[in-house]
Image (cartoon, grey):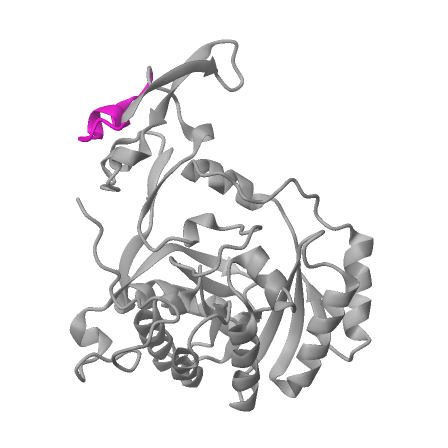
Amino acid sequence: MSEPAATGAEPVGAEPSVAPGTVGGTSAAERGLTGRVYDIQGFSVHDGPGIRTTVFLKGCPLRCLWCHSPESQAFQRELSWMEMRCIGVDECGLCIEACAKGGISPGEPVKAPGRDTEMRLVTFDRSMCDNCGSCGSACMSKAVYLCGTDYTVADVVERVVKDVAFFERSGGGVTISGGEPLSQPEFTLALLEACKKAGLHTALDTTGYVRWEVMQGVLPFTDLLLYDLKHMDSATHKQLTGVPNERILENARRVAAAGGRLQVRIPLIPGMNDSAENVEAAGRFCSELGDAVTVVQLLPYHRLGSAKYKRLQRPDPMPPTEPPSCDEVAAHVLRLEALGLPVVVH
């Protein structure tokens, strides 16, 4: 089974043939537009003000070494396997039978967790996988699953509005995240517009690495942009993320000039972007944006992405790195506050 085309998703940097969100004058709803989502997380408290529901879309043009959501990078569906959930071939093994391609087979015996016995896990030949999902449907323990589900705009809004009571009490709303949600520009625009029509506060978590026309199109329906500044030197930015930063910085300036609101997010990755010089440069840039910046959010590095690479059976590009100490983070907070910026740490 082949993967469907990326409905509504244009490659970042490509020139659009039509305005985002419209094709031949028909609306997204009329065309049954879908977007590819890898998670919808309720009761999220770090993705904008208040209690929020965050919708995570697949696809991202960046390849940050420290990426904590590698399942968000590719647009296509991907098989994910959680070894700790697997109960072994002898007790289950249904995924082997379910794979029509013969791409799953018994592995070598390993020690069973918490027991003195051995168990055989499974092995995957991913070169044979067509992401049909049959193995995940058969898996008794849900150790195998497909990452990536296609939703219509109405599907997502129906899920999100279930949390309205939390939004109203906390000043929260919906956040569209990724990956890079603007890698699916039509769907993201339609979803933001539908959420605004439903009376919801909207936030968009973006890398900023997108054509200005796409960014400009979503601004009328976006109350807040969660905007990443990963490194202020373009050459270093490209080494760390795979892309330069000129477009990102220019889009931030344009958003500010257009009256948009920004919650700037700075990841603190030891040995990569956490120098005093880089943090201060990011702070000066935020100061230049003026009142458009509502807060600067520091995101100290964590190692949660490592386990996700294992689930995808892909190598983790991040070298062994310890999270920054509390004292180091506090020093960066002081540097930014000295520039008159409001700062929070997540």
- Residue toward you, 197 or 28: 28
Where does the N terminus fall, quadrant-wise? top left
Where does the C terminus fall, quadrant-wise? bottom right
Q: Is residue 280 left or right of residue 145?
A: right
**On screen, 259 above or below 48?**
below
The quadrant where residue 253 appears: bottom right
Total label count?
A: 0
The quadrant where residue 158 appears: bottom left
Residue 151 at x, y percent in the picture: 27, 60
- Residue toward you, 86 or 286: 286
Q: Is residue 336 left or right of residue 26?
A: right
Residue 246 at x, y percent in the picture: 55, 74
Q: Is residue 13 left or right of residue 77?
A: right
**On screen, 259 above or below 151?**
below
- Single out the residue that lies furthest toward the front: 235
Query: Is 240 part of what is drawn in magenta?
Result: no
Residue at 40%, 27% in the rendered image:
86
Residue 69 at x, y percent in the picture: 49, 51
Residue at 51%, 20% in the rendered image:
113
The quadrant where residue 133 appears: top left
Can see residue 230? no
Can see residue 195? yes
Q: Main secondary structure of the magenta part?
A: loop
Q: Is residue 277 left or right of residue 52?
A: right
Residue at 52%, 9% in the rendered image:
116
Residue 150 at x, y percent in the picture: 27, 57
Magenta range: 91-103
Residue at 39%, 78% in the rendered image:
214
**On screen, 287 above or below 278?**
below
